[in-house]
Image (tube, rainbow, N blue to C red):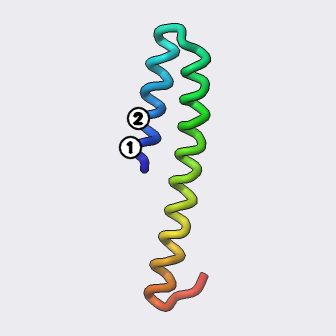
Amino acid sequence: MAEVTQGFSYLGQHCFTYDLDKTGRVLQIITVFSGLFSMVLFFFGVLSACNGFGLTL
């Protein structure tokens, strides 16, 4: 998921280079949500691993 976030970040900056500000802004928003979604998935993965080992948080 980090690769997807990095890719959207790169594309957004690329759009700003060529004065495609509206497209760049949309890609920045997608980048933020992609990063947040990645952190949520990581958190649920940690919870799943803890449950698998019989640990509680």
Q: Residue at x 54, y 29 (%)?
A: 27
At mark 1, the secondary structure is helix
Residue 25, given in percent of the width and then of the height, sits at: 60, 24
42 over 36 or under it: above or below: below
- Pointer 2 with pointer 1, Cβ within 8 A: yes
Query: Compared with residue 13, is residue 1 higher up or lower down, i.e. above or below?
Result: below
What numbered label is drawn on residue 7? 2
The residue pinned by badge 1 equals 3
Badge 1 density bin: few <14, some 14–19, many ≥20, Cα 10 Å: few
Q: Which mark is residue 15?
A: none
The amino acid pointed to by label 1 is Glu
Percent across and percent down for residue 45 are: 48, 70
Q: Position of residue 47 (x, y in %)?
A: 53, 76
**Horizontal and vertical percent position of residue 35:** 53, 46
Q: Which quadrant of the structure image shows residue 49?
A: bottom left
Q: Residue at x 56, y 20 (%)?
A: 23
Residue sitting at 60 percent across and 81 percent down?
A: 57
Does residue 3 appear to the left or right of 13 in the view shown? left
Give SS at disc 2.
Answer: helix
